[in-house]
Image (cartoon, rainbow, N blue to C red):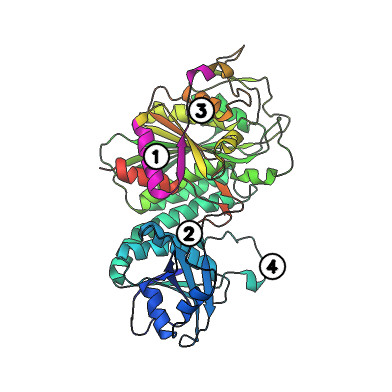
Amino acid sequence: MRIEFVSIDRANPPSDGAVATVVVEGGKLSTGAELLDKVAGGALGRAVAAGRFKGAKGTNLELVAPAGLEGARIAMVGVSDKGWDGDAAEDFGASAYAAVKTSGAATLTLLLADASGEEGARAAFGATLASYRFDKYRTTEKPEKKPSVETVRVAVDDPAAAEAAWATWKSLAEAIFFSRDLVSEPPNVLYPESYAQRIKALESMGLEVEILGEAEMAKLGMGSLLGVGQGSRRDSQLVVIQWKGGGDAQPIAFVGKGVTFDTGGISIKPADGMEDMKWDMGGSAAVAGLMHALAGRKAKANVVGILGLVENMPDGNAQRPGDVVTSMSGQTIEIINTDAEGRLVLADALWYCQDRFKPKFMVDLATLTGAIIISLGNDVSGLFSNNDELSENLLAASKATGEQLWRMPLPPAYEKQIDSMIADVKNTGGRAGGSITAGLFLQRFVNNTPWAHLDIAGTAWKKPSTVPTIPDGATGFGVRLLDRMVADSYES
């Protein structure tokens, strides 16, 4: 989809394709809506007065070919009366696109009289995020079900300023789409080796990428990670991504769980819904998307991304409940449930990260526990951390981007739930406090490095989605959040 920025002709507002304009909650027409209303002989005002649409956020009203604008489809999009800003512009762009995407119009004009250049760019960003589709495997979809909008024109008073601001938002949108694509791919296409090669291709952006195979990980003693993938015919991989934009500064690090398909192993999952387990690599996709974003905007920071990529399958060589494995840290782990596999991958990835790179901090992301969905639902991710400063920076970025986090406790008393009778630790502590005991397990492998764990099991995938910038499916959760945190708190 093309994005264009154009000037507003206030005497002759656009009258082709679809045109979206703002109505403020309570029924107040924006300046852009008033321009259209004047040309249309008051049709917009009459439509608002005559019906139930009063501009509430998340609602819209369409008018087709009103007098004076016969060639146009007008979408009036409601926004909150709490003030117009970049966030409101983004929601407007997303909602406008959703309202007309299959209307038959090839062009959508976002009419934003009196908006700043930054707000125009944010509207384009919202429309772009809303336009995401993963349709590379569709061959028989009916034309009327396909989006018709090919171009979004953002009409603002200063299009040059909007286009300048758009460069950064475009880069972020591309990174989010990269993450969404990874999560959306079927598991027969995206498996550890093919996934690693997709990351290797990011070297063209200036990233440095290393891929460690099973022999190299075995030499390092990564028995915890390798145990998860031993039932698969696909070789496990550890991918190391580096962005060196911060001179001699100490690096910061992000680690992602990348289980490209999770059957549960010998502790096999129920068949119903198992197809969704292709997105059990959502944490690694968020880290990959973050590195894409940082390279895209040439971030002034040294950043390491680590992806632990495995497939959890139940063949005759698969890990069993009752097995004991030795992690890279030297700690032994009793396997109680082979479906508690993500923490085993992260245990070795985290230890490797802190041991090799000595980072200022580590943040891991993982679709780790169903328990976090019971706790926080599908719109909020759990934040667990051993460091208040890091937590505060993550929460600030969460508030700024709308990717919601809630800090959860790590009570030492719960450690006893993961004490093993025969090993140093067991990989699950039972149902009670399941997301907490998973966090406590991971904490044993950070070696006192400042660390945060984001459990994104509820937020990596939306079906159905109620967020205008996120179509059903992969969300790319974490890319925007972490990019903002790096920009606000850790760039030189």
Q: Residues within 10 Å of mark 2 (few under 14, many from 20)?
A: many
For the residue marked with disc 2, what is the amino acid?
Answer: Leu
Q: CA distance from mark 4 to mark 3?
A: 45 Å
User: According to the image, label 2 marks what residue?
Assistant: 129
How many numbered circles does the render carry?
A: 4
Q: Is residue 116 above or below residue 429?
A: below
Please tell me which residue lies in front, 69 or 332. 69
**Which of pointers 2 and 1 lies earlier in the amino acid sequence?**
2
Residue 153 in the image: state x and y as whole percent.
41, 73
**Apparent side of residue 468 relative to residue 263 in the rendered image (left or right):** left
Residue 181 in the image: state x and y as whole percent.
54, 53
**Which of pointers 2 and 4 lies earlier in the amino acid sequence?**
2
Q: Is residue 419 above or below residue 171?
A: above
**Which of pointers 4 and 1 lies earlier in the amino acid sequence?**
4
Quadrant location of the C terminus in the rendered image: top left
- Give the main secondary structure of the magenta stretch: helix
Q: Residue at x 48, y 60 (%)?
A: 57
Please tell me which residue lies in front, 248 or 141. 141
Q: Residue at x 58, y 18 (%)?
A: 417
Span highlighted in magenta in the image: 389-414
Q: CA distance from mark 3 to mark 2?
A: 31 Å
Q: Callout 2: helix, strand or loop?
A: helix
Residue 340 counted in the magenta span = no
Residue 407 counted in the magenta span = yes
Q: CA distance from mark 1 to mark 3?
A: 18 Å
Q: CA distance from mark 2 to mark 4?
A: 25 Å
User: According to the image, label 1 marks what residue?
Assistant: 395
